Image: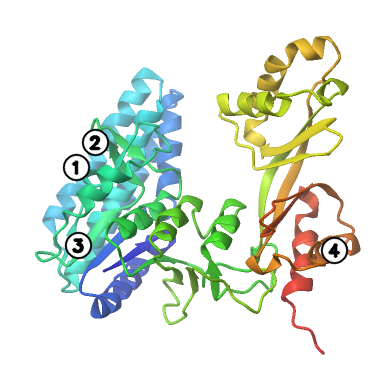
Amino acid sequence: MRVIKFGGSSLADAPAVDQAVSVIQNTYRDDPSLCVVVSAAGGVTDEIIATARLASGKRIEYKDHLSKLRKRQMSMVSTIARGDRDVSDLVQELCLEFSSICDGVYALGELSAKVLDRLMSFGELCSAHLIAAACRQKGLDARFEDTRDLIVTDEHFGRARVDFGATNERMRRLDFMDAPIRIMPGFVARSANGRITTLGRNGSDYTAAIIGAALDAGVVEIWTDVDGVMTANPEYVANASPIEQMSYVEAMELSHFGAHVLHSPTIQPVKEKHIPLRVCNTFHPEFKGTLVGEQGEANRIITGISIIDDVSFIRVEGSGMVGVFGVAGRLFSAMAVHEVNLMMISQGSSEHSICFAIQSSDVQRAVLAIEKEFEPEMKAHMVDAPVVEKDMCVLAVVGENMRRQPGISGMVFGSLGSAGVNVVSIAQGSSERNISMVIYKADAVPAMNAIHEVFFTPNPD
């Protein structure tokens, strides 16, 4: 059993779909049972969200977007599912349902997370029907399988949590004897009450991992448009190269800190079952890509450099924080209540200040939460008003082989000093697998290139 997943860039148009089906054909020759998880075609989910927001804002232009989406889907049907009347009718029905819901959103001027989840499911559903039809056109015994009937979640719309017990029980009932290739929409699920939910943006990777773990797959493959996980973002570092092998932990660290090829929650289900995960290029299938498993590459000190941009840095300080029990607990609890994710935390031993990095979109909620929680201390001048620094980013240097290796931090910060990059804050966990730092966004390119030069450029000697 093998689970393979195709991202939106691999399904963007008819030639891309032909290439994806070719990968499915070649994979099926080696594996008699195959689950294929698909994303929406490239750009479709973004267009769905834009359409829904226009409708909720009472902007009649949403109808133009509806028309554009429908034309794109039906054009794909006519070129990919030629002569398959059943699939044409199914996609047409999905388009009509999508239009009807958007009309309702426009009439009410309101878009709830629950309704948005339902709307966002249409991209993946259309893709799955189309890919199943394309496989049958090539003579493959493929059938659409609705993941909404298999993956059970709570009702945290927009980022639902999976009920693995109920999900695994349903997955194990699948019988591949009557159709050895199942084409499944990624990203979508249903709550125990039958409401459509989604697993968060880029959740199709997670879907593949959930299915792979439930069915004890031999491997889970993520097919995208790059040659694997890279040593750094090639948009920042021109000589970034594919990583041949990395550990689950390294993959989790890099994906958390902005390596967009992998979706962070994807790693946990396969890690628990010790299932290898491979990242491959749909348009370069002969290349092995990146293998994620128990071990990384033994000959590399660090595995990769990752970055999260559009970050703000908040500093909470005051004399009234020194030696006082529970200050950090109150601060972090306030952030949790207001659903602000802290991506990095730093506190000096003086206890005079606590600093943390968050997405810039969360700044207003974070500041209001701090002011409310520490209002008495601020009035008494024991805690200062929070200081916000914008236009920052978090850079992370990740590698299993950094552990117990003296001098690694010196090499990292020495390279940044030579490049004239100022480090605002530093954090390193006791695992020693990750050195994280906050720097100014303007310094992102020179910082990543400086570190990459030190660790990944071959020594001429």
Q: Where, quadrant-wise, is the C terminus in this rendering?
A: bottom right
Q: Mark 3 touching mark 2, by CB under 8 A?
A: no
Tell me the kind of residue under disc 3.
Ala
Q: Which residue is tagged 4? A: 410
Residue 230, compared with residue 71, is above or below; it is below
Q: Secondary structure at mark 3?
A: helix
Cα–Cα gap, marks 3 and 2: 21 Å
The amino acid at mark 4 is Gly
Q: Are marks 4 and 1 in contact (CB under 8 Å)?
A: no
- Residue 438 in picture, x, y percent from top left: 76, 47
Q: CA distance from mark 2 to mark 4?
A: 59 Å
For the residues carrying marks 4 and 3, which lies nearer the camera in this image?
4
Q: Which disc number belongs to residue 97? A: 2
Residue 20 seen in this snapshot = yes
Between the residue at mark 2 and the residue at mark 1, the CA separation in whole angstroms equals 6 Å
> What separation in Å lies between label 1 and label 3 (alpha carbons)?
16 Å
Q: Residue at x 19, y 62 (%)?
A: 133
Contact between labelled residues 1 and 2, with CB atoms less than 8 Å apart:
yes
- Count of labels in the image: 4
Q: How is the image coloured?
A: rainbow
Q: Secondary structure at mark 1?
A: helix
To which residue does mark 1 refer? 93
- Secondary structure, mark 2, is helix
Rendering coords of residue 68 (x, y %): 37, 45
First in sequence: mark 4 or mark 1? 1
As measured in the structure, the alpha-carbon distance from the residue carrying label 4 to the one carrying label 1 is 61 Å
Please report whichever mark, 2 or 4, sits nearer to the chain's N-terminal start: 2
The crowding category of the residue bearing disc 1, from other C-alpha atoms within 10 Å (few below 14, some 14 to 19, many at least 20), is: few
Q: Secondary structure at mark 4?
A: helix
Q: Amino acid at mark 1?
A: Glu
Name the residue beneath numbered marker 3.
Answer: 133
